Image (tube, rainbow, N blue to C red):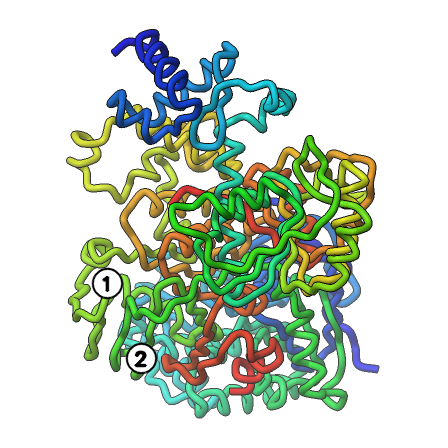
């Protein structure tokens, strides 16, 4: 029996009535690679954040070397021997790779802040860092400033930083989602080196390839619930896909026969830094579903269409006419609406009232002169009531609302415009069930009245239940087009995870 | 024009034509439809006329039962909800399908929404549904069948042994069932024995049964039990349906359409 270094018992985490982790147990042994496998929204990242002390579990306990511990922040986690490589890179752009590599250790040993580097022999530091990088086989120059690296290279620096610490447990949240095959192979090789040193690795991933290449044991999460734990010898692809995907619930979505054959939106050979040869056609009354793993280019596609970023080549046609969408305001003029996945970042203005949020994309002078203010307020109050949004009035701050209700406000904001092409990016991620049902029915309302929807989602049931056609993206390209009615959860998963 | 003056003119128009719709009144008096609806509502409350879907009629002894309806069912909200239910139903039915519309106001609304379709066969036991099908601007071109039977004078629908015998010879792609009560614990209910036995027969003879009812029917029980809450896979209701039903249906893989009308 290998020694158990980490044990989680009955970890439960709830965000605004949504259960993200439902009594999850996990046992990690010394010197093993334990893969946590699951789709987006399965609860993997929440688990990582609980381990790193970013979130506190509502109930359950964590044991390290059989001793019960509480973790309140990443420093504490680190003191307990846990090092976490988060999905977002966490580096200082203005410092070299070498300085970044050791910043954690320096800070911990000396308790110093930003001025530290002036007092440290940078040259020696970089030499030491270079030795670490060479040992790991990473083709990086330790003296280069991190700001000059691309995303994949930054990931490698993060990983090198994890490897250079004294951590006994290294947790990596989707480290392979955006790096090349060659870099993956190097990473896998280094896992073996660490294992020999007795370090345990928790690898969080969506990819079966990662499992097959490095896992000793595998735990599958779905909807916050642990589905199974088994060793790599017990691995069977079909069973694993079944565990990851779960039951087919496509029938519960309010899908209407609104599809027509009139093309309202089309892209021709869109190419950019991230995307390759994107050709999509959207019909009036259609829901075009797009899915793909983290880093597949799905969300970037939405941002390109909405004019947040520029294409290198290719064209966009609206109602068969070529248009030049050079900014979001131009996109809006052409009737495109974009409901982003990151409400906190793009959509909701936190310190404004619900009303101001609703009106935030109206042209200011129109808003002040043409629209009778109080009249509009009455209509909007009526809409809030209809959508069951619990606020005493539209003058309330938007912050008092639940995530589900914020999303409904985001939607309402677009409903008062003349949009007819709606891009939804993860419209129901992290929101409660009744709000989900409302949002699906609001979509049905849009379609009934002649709008079209591009739905980006990683909820496969939602994808199957709402879409007419499904596009699967990988590494910035569309790798498969499926008709919803002819496909299954298993088939979609095969295209998604067997890459 | 002042409200009182408008009301006088509405009364005069109605006295001449016995029935009138909101559009005509709005043009005639040159005020918004909202204003007309408000006037009609007030006149209805005064007992001068009876507000109907989209207009008003003079009170008539044969129509007295209309006043017995609970107030919600005389409201604009109710009419609007039913209208959207009709539109949603239309987008569920495939071309060329055979459809049964059971007795009730929701099915009347569906009839109004689908009456222009050509490639469709509709069967109903409700005379009001029949009238709704026939009262479009254009002549109804679809095949409509009414099973024979005994007429119930209150609901204007046919039922009984003869009706059921005839239903036995038919099969439907879609049956729309207007239920009178729903609870999570017990399921779906019909108010009368006649409605119950017709619906039971139709359920056995349909590929898909779709429940249609406005939100006021939820958390209400009546006498005749049609089946438990999981026995039907599709529900169309108004958006004010209690939250617990939204959650229950979703978690049990049951499709719920609600009548949002905000876009």
Q: Toward the viewer: A221 or A266?
A: A266
Query: What residue is shown with label 1?
Result: A307
- Viewer can see residue A333: yes
| Residue shown at the point (46%, 43%) measured from the top left | B135
How many marks the image carries: the answer is 2
Point out the image quarter for the N terminus of chain B.
Answer: top left
Q: Is residue A183 above or below residue A418?
A: below
Point out the image quarter for the C terminus of chain B.
Answer: top left
Q: Nearer the viewer, mark 1 or mark 2?
A: 2
Q: Is residue B167 left or right of residue A295?
A: right
- Residue A280 in the image: state x and y as whole percent: 33, 76
Q: Quadrant of residue B43?
A: top left
Q: Quadrant of residue B38?
A: top left
Which structural element holds mark 2?
strand
- Residue A112 in the image: state x and y as whole percent: 42, 56
| Residue shown at the point (25%, 82%) measured from the top left | A269
């Amino acid at each position: 029996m290998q020694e158990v270094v980490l044990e989680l018992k009955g970890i439960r985490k709830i965000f605004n009535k949504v259960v993200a982790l439902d009594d999850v147990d996990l046992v990690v042994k010394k010197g093993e690679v334990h893969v946590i496998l699951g789709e987006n929204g399965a609860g993997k990242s929440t688990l990582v954040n609980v381990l790193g002390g970013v979130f506190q579990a509502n109930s359950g306990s964590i044991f390290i070397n059989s001793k019960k511990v509480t973790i309140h922040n990443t420093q504490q986690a680190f003191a307990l021997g846990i090092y976490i490589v988060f999905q977002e890179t966490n580096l200082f752009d203005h410092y070299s790779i070498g300085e970044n590599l050791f910043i954690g250790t320096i800070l911990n040993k000396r308790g110093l802040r930003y001025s530290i580097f002036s007092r440290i022999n940078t040259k020696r530091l970089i030499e030491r860092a270079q030795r670490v990088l060479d040992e790991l086989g990473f083709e990086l120059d330790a003296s280069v400033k991190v700001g000059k690296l691309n995303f994949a290279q930054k990931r490698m620096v993060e990983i090198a930083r994890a490897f250079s610490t004294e951590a006994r447990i290294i947790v990596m949240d989707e480290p392979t989602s955006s790096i090349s095959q060659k870099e993956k192979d190097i990473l896998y090789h280094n896992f073996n080196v660490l294992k020999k040193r007795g370090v345990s690795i928790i690898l969080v991933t969506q990819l079966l390839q990662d499992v097959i290449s490095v896992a000793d044991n595998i735990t599958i999460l779905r909807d916050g619930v642990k589905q199974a734990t088994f060793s790599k010898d017990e691995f069977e692809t079909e069973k694993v896909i079944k565990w990851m995907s779960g039951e087919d619930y496509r029938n519960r979505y309010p899908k209407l026969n609104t599809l027509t054959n009139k093309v309202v939106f089309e892209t021709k050979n869109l190419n950019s830094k991230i995307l390759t040869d994107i050709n999509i056609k959207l019909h009036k009354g259609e829901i075009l579903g797009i899915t793909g793993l983290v880093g597949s280019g799905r969300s970037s596609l939405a941002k390109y269409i909405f004019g947040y970023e520029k294409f290198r080549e290719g064209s966009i046609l609206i109602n068969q006419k070529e248009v030049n969408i050079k900014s979001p305001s131009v996109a809006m003029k052409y009737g495109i609406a974009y409901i982003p996945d990151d409400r906190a970042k793009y959509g909701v203005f936190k310190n404004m009232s619900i009303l101001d949020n609703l009106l935030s994309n109206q042209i200011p002078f129109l808003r002040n002169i043409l629209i009778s203010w109080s009249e509009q307020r009455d209509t909007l109050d009526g809409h809030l009531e209809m959508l069951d949004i619990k606020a005493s009035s539209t003058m309330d701050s938007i912050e008092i609302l639940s995530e589900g209700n914020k999303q409904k406000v985001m939607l309402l904001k677009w409903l008062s415009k003349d949009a007819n092409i709606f891009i939804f990016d993860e419209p129901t991620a992290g929101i409660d069930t009744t709000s989900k049902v409302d949002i699906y029915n609001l979509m049905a309302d849009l379609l009934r009245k002649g709008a079209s929807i591009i739905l980006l989602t990683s909820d496969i049931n939602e994808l199957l239940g709402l879409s007419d056609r499904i596009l699967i993206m990988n590494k910035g390209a569309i790798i498969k087009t499926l008709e919803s009615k002819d496909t299954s959860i298993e088939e979609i998963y095969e295209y998604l995870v067997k890459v | 024009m002042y409200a009182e003056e408008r009301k006088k003119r509405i009364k005069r128009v109605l006295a001449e034509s016995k029935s009138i719709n909101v559009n005509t009144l709005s043009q005639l008096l040159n005020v918004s439809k909202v204003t007309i609806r408000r006037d009609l509502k007030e006149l209805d409350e005064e007992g001068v006329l009876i507000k109907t879907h989209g207009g008003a009629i003079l009170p008539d002894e044969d129509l007295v039962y209309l006043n017995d309806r609970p107030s919600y069912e005389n409201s604009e909200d109710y009419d609007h909800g039913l209208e959207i239910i009709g539109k949603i139903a239309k987008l569920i039915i495939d071309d060329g399908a055979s459809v049964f519309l059971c007795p009730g106001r929701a099915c009347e609304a569906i009839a109004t929404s689908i009456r222009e379709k050509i490639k469709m066969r509709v069967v109903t036991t409700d005379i009001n549904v029949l009238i709704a099908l026939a009262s479009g601007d254009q002549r109804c071109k679809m095949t409509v069948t009414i099973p024979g039977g005994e007429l119930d004078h209150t609901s204007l629908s046919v039922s009984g042994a003869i009706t059921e015998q005839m239903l036995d010879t038919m099969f439907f792609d879609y049956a729309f069932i207007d239920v009178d009560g729903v609870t999570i614990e017990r399921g779906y209910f019909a108010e009368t024995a006649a409605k119950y036995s017709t619906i039971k027969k139709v359920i056995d003879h349909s590929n898909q049964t779709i429940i249609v009812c406005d939100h006021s029917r939820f958390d209400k029980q009546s006498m005749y039990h049609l089946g438990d809450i999981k026995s039907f896979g599709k529900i169309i209701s108004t958006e004010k349906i209690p939250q617990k039903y939204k959650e229950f249906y979703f978690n049990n893989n049951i499709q719920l359409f609600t009548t949002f009308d905000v876009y």
